[in-house]
Image (spheres, rainbow, N blue to C red):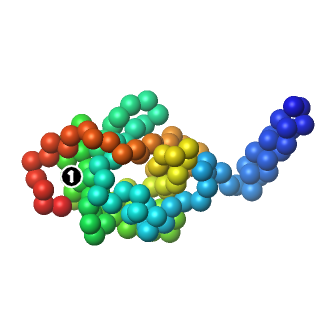
C-alpha cells in the first residue's frame, strides 16, 4: 500500500515538475468527436454543485445557450485543442473549453485550465423556453 502511494505521489510530482496538468479521462476531444457527442442534443451543464446552463447543439456547429441571464445563439469551432464558442453578444471574445470524456460524462475546463473547476455536460431534457429559433 505504501509503495502504491509513493508511486502516485512521484507521478504527481513529475507532472508538476514538467509543468503539465493531467486531464482526467484522456486527451481533449477534437471537433469531430465533440460534434458526434453533442449534435442534435440538449445538454445540461453543471458546475461542481448545480445546473447552471442548458445548451442545444444544432447542425453546422451552431448552438443555443440558456442560463439565468437568458438565451443566446452561438457558433463553435476547434482552436488548437479547445472548442471555442462565439456567442452573438460577444463574437470577438470566444469562450473556449477543453472537453473530454470522464466516467461516461462530457467534462469541460474553461480556457483549458485543467487545474481549475470542471463542468459536467450531460444529455438532459430541461426546457429551453427561448423566444427565438434563429440560430
| Residue at the spot of label 1 | 72
Quick check: 100 left or right of 95?
right
Indicate whether 57 appears above or below 68. Answer: below
Instruction: Give 118 or 32, whichever is nearer the viewer.
Output: 32
Which type of secondary structure does the marked residue at label 1 adopt?
Answer: strand
Residue occupying image coordinates x 20% and y 52%: 72
Is the residue marked by circle 1 packed among few (<14), some (14-19), or many (20+) residues within 10 Å? Answer: some
Residue occupying image coordinates x 44% and y 68%: 32
Quick check: 80 left or right of 93?
right
x and y percentages locating residue 74 in the rendered image: 26, 60
Indicate whether 88 appears above or below 129. Answer: below
x and y percentages locating residue 29 in the rendered image: 51, 61
Indicate whether 6 appears above or below 112. Answer: above
Quick check: 99 left or right of 52?
right
Residue occupying image coordinates x 37% and y 42%: 45
Instruction: Give 67 or 3, whichever is nearer the viewer.
Output: 3
Would residue 125 be visible to someone looking at this image? yes
x and y percentages locating residue 44 in the rendered image: 34, 42
Quadrant location of the N terminus in the rendered image: top right
Q: Quadrant for residue 67, please give it.
A: top left
Quadrant location of the C terminus in the rendered image: bottom left
Instruction: Give 3 or 110, whichever is nearer the viewer.
Output: 3
Residue occupying image coordinates x 52% and y 65%: 81
Amino acid at each position: 500500500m505504501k509503495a502504491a502511494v509513493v508511486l502516485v505521489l512521484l507521478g504527481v510530482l513529475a507532472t508538476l515538475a514538467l509543468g503539465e496538468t493531467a486531464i482526467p479521462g484522456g486527451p481533449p476531444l477534437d471537433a469531430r468527436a465533440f460534434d458526434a457527442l453533442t449534435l442534435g442534443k440538449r445538454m445540461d451543464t453543471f458546475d461542481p454543485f448545480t445546473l447552471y446552463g442548458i445548451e442545444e447543439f444544432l447542425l453546422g456547429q451552431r448552438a443555443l445557450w440558456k442560463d439565468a441571464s437568458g438565451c443566446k445563439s452561438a457558433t463553435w469551432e476547434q482552436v488548437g485543442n479547445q472548442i471555442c464558442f462565439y456567442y452573438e453578444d460577444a463574437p470577438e471574445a470566444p469562450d473556449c473549453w477543453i472537453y473530454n470524456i470522464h466516467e461516461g460524462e462530457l467534462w469541460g475546463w474553461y480556457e483549458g485550465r485543467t487545474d481549475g473547476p470542471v463542468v459536467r455536460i450531460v444529455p438532459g431534457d430541461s426546457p429551453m423556453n427561448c423566444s427565438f429559433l434563429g440560430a
